[in-house]
């Protein structure tokens, strides 16, 4: 059998949220409910191993959903910086509702040049508000589409006035629930009043949580006209007046939620409320058999959960399995979200166990900047997921990208990281001033470590010919002390110069330093040597579980699955991997040798 090589990976960009705690009443952990095919109307399949019990139960939310024909209709409201955008994304992701935002609708209609869009553009160009009748017409048209009728809808921040609510009522647009996110005024005011703008760079600072880096910058900072305390209070007052009027229109279905908590906690309550609506419908419509089936599923899951808890295993039992179609790029949001969550959980577990020098090695086509520079965006999406999750726990996170490597021809960053800092600045970090408050951007180096930083995430640090990143990394980890430092896809191996000679300067120092980091997550696709297809299998490790080797199997119907063929307490060498695919026993396995041995055991 031909030797296997360890694949590289790729990227893109879409907000993705971290692991979501599920409702204790209606949605036990997702991994315990997951069926082998989690999206039956999709081309994405997740394969499981015999260890994963049960393999035939859908999620409780999905079960209730399939028993109720009438789709959910949800309205959500919240002041600026209340976290409304985040909750909308999580609701859509969990319940499959059609997200309807009037701002998005206006932009879509204008860009499409529709009659409604042309009328709206006239008002927008003149600086006037778009009349209610035009907005209502757009909303009504969107609600009448088949996807909204079939899947249900989520109206984001609309209606804003009592008149708009009355207009919707006349069109028989009524929600099942009206969610009102509540955050104390002083928190919202403090975030806005403390903001400062650098007119030269356009960068936003905060006088308390994100001060300027120098006196020169500080001297030229200005306050935006709308960020005075008086104007912020005025905006909040207008919002309150409108929301009070709206509440009167939807008081019978309105639920106020304390949104001054971590987003996962807020969503847990939201998810319970929405699931309860579906469950109540089952009861009211007399679907007692379906309800009984639901309760039987619940009991079976709880029993199985206890069985899994009683049977401790060195192999991770409770997870979703490996997504298929991994060589098709760009990957779907489902596949990207799967890896973001998988990496996040492993990193969190490792840090909770007291580890402070962590390394994430994830190489699939969509997460490997070596293969295509523009895919660095998806890697940044993974970084954002990690950073926001830690920020939600009150940690201050410093996200660091490799800085300049010298002067002249070496003034730029490595090609694969070009533009990374700008991508991070332009990404959506939510509407609550997270970026600059709990998440800050920096470069790799000791000078970037501030006392207020709790955790450091370093994006793809790599050596370059004539320049060794280890010195900057060493300075940073020394300054960080016992605070966690997470390396995402580092490239610290020997690199060939233009002459073809391998760069070996400081090699011993590099290898010694590399050993101070522990892998908390590994996922590498395995190919025939020198090819990118077909995929032969995958190697996965999620802390604190064992390394797992999977073989990709093509089924008769053209679909594929990943089958577990071996586990290892330590990272297997390429020779061990080849032996496992060849069916050799452990006793027949040969010791690693040559370049394969170096790559298998080294820090690359």
Image: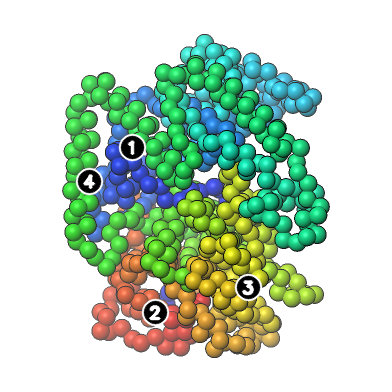
In the rendering, which numbered label is found on residue 573? 2
3D distance between C-alphas at marks 3 and 4: 49 Å
Count the labels in the image.
4
Q: Which comes before the other along the chain, label 4 or label 1?
A: 1
Q: Which residue is mark 4?
A: 301
**Residue at 72% of width from left, 47% of height from top?**
196
Residue 519 figure quarter: bottom left
Residue 111 visible here: no
Front residue (pair 20, 68): 20
Is 449 above or below relative to 507?
above
Q: Which residue is mark 3?
A: 446
Q: Secondary structure at mark 4?
A: helix
Q: Secondary structure at mark 3?
A: helix
Is 184 above or below relative to 394?
above
Q: Which comes before the other along the chain, label 1 or label 3?
A: 1
On the image, the x and y values in percent for residue 137 come to 60, 18
Is residue 598 rendered to the left or right of residue 379? left
Query: Closer to us: mark 3 or mark 4?
Result: 3
Q: Which comes before the other along the chain, label 1 or label 2?
A: 1
Q: Residues within 10 Å of mark 3 (few under 14, many from 20)?
A: some
3D distance between C-alphas at marks 4 and 1: 14 Å
In the rendering, which numbered label is found on residue 487? none
In the rendering, which numbered label is found on residue 61? 1
**Residue at 44% of width from left, 24% of height from top?**
254
3D distance between C-alphas at marks 2 and 4: 38 Å
Q: Which comes before the other along the chain, label 2 or label 4?
A: 4
On the image, the x and y values in percent for residue 36 come to 31, 49
């Amino acid at each position: 059998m031909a030797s296997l090589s360890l694949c590289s990976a790729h990227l893109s960009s879409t907000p993705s949220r971290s692991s979501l705690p599920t409702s204790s009443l209606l949605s036990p952990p997702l991994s315990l409910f997951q069926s082998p095919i989690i999206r039956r109307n999709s081309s994405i399949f997740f394969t499981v191993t015999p260890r994963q019990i049960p393999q035939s139960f859908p999620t409780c939310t999905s079960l209730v959903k399939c028993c109720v024909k009438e789709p959910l209709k949800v309205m959500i409201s919240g002041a600026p910086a209340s976290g409304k955008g985040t909750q909308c994304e999580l609701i859509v992701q969990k319940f499959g509702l059609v997200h309807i935002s009037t701002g998005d609708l206006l932009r879509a209609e204008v860009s499409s040049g529709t009659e409604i869009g042309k009328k709206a553009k006239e008002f927008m160009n003149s600086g006037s508000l778009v009349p209610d009748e035009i907005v209502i017409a757009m909303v009504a048209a969107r609600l009448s589409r088949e996807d909204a009728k079939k899947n249900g809808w989520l109206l984001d921040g609309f209606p804003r006035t009592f008149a708009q609510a009355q207009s919707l009522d006349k069109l028989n647009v009524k929600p099942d629930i009206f969610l009102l996110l509540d955050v104390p005024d002083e928190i919202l005011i403090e975030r806005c009043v403390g903001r400062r703008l650098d007119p030269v760079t356009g960068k936003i600072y905060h006088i308390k949580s994100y001060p300027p880096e120098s006196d020169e910058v500080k001297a030229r900072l200005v306050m935006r006209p709308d960020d005075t305390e008086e104007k912020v209070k005025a905006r909040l007052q207008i919002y309150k007046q409108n929301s009070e009027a709206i509440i009167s229109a939807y008081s019978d279905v309105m639920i106020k939620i304390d949104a001054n908590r971590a987003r996962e906690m807020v969503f847990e309550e939201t998810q319970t409320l929405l699931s309860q609506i579906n469950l109540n419908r089952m009861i009211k419509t007399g679907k007692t058999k379906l309800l009984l089936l639901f309760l039987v599923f619940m009991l079976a899951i709880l029993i199985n959960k206890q069985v899994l808890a009683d049977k401790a295993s060195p192999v991770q039992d409770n997870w979703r399995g490996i997504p298929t179609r991994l060589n098709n790029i760009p990957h779907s949001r489902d596949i990207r979200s799967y890896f973001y969550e998988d990496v996040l959980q492993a990193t969190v577990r490792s840090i909770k166990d007291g580890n402070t020098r962590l390394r994430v090695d994830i190489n699939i086509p969509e997460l490997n900047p070596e293969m295509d520079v523009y895919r660095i965006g998806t890697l940044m999406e993974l970084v954002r997921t990690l950073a926001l999750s830690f920020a939600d726990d009150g940690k201050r996170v410093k996200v660091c990208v490799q800085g300049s490597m010298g002067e002249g021809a070496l003034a730029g960053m490595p090609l694969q990281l070009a533009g990374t800092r700008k991508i991070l600045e332009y990404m959506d970090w939510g509407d609550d001033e997270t970026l600059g408050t709990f998440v800050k951007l920096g470069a790799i180096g000791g000078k970037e470590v501030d006392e207020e930083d709790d955790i450091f995430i370093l994006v793809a640090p790599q050596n370059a010919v004539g320049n060794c990143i280890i010195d900057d990394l060493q300075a940073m980890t020394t300054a960080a002390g016992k605070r966690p430092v997470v390396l995402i896809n580092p490239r610290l191996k020997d690199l060939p110069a233009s002459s073809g000679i391998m760069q070996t300067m400081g090699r011993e120092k590099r290898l010694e330093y590399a050993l101070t980091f522990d892998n908390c997550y590994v996922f590498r696709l395995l190919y025939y040597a020198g090819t990118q297809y077909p995929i032969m299998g995958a190697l996965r490790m999620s802390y604190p579980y064992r390394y797992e080797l999977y073989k990709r199997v093509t089924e008769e119907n053209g679909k594929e699955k990943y089958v577990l063929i071996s586990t290892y307490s330590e990272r297997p060498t390429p020779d061990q991997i080849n032996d496992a695919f060849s069916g050799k026993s452990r006793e027949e396995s040969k010791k690693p040798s040559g370049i394969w041995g170096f790559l298998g055991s080294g820090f690359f």
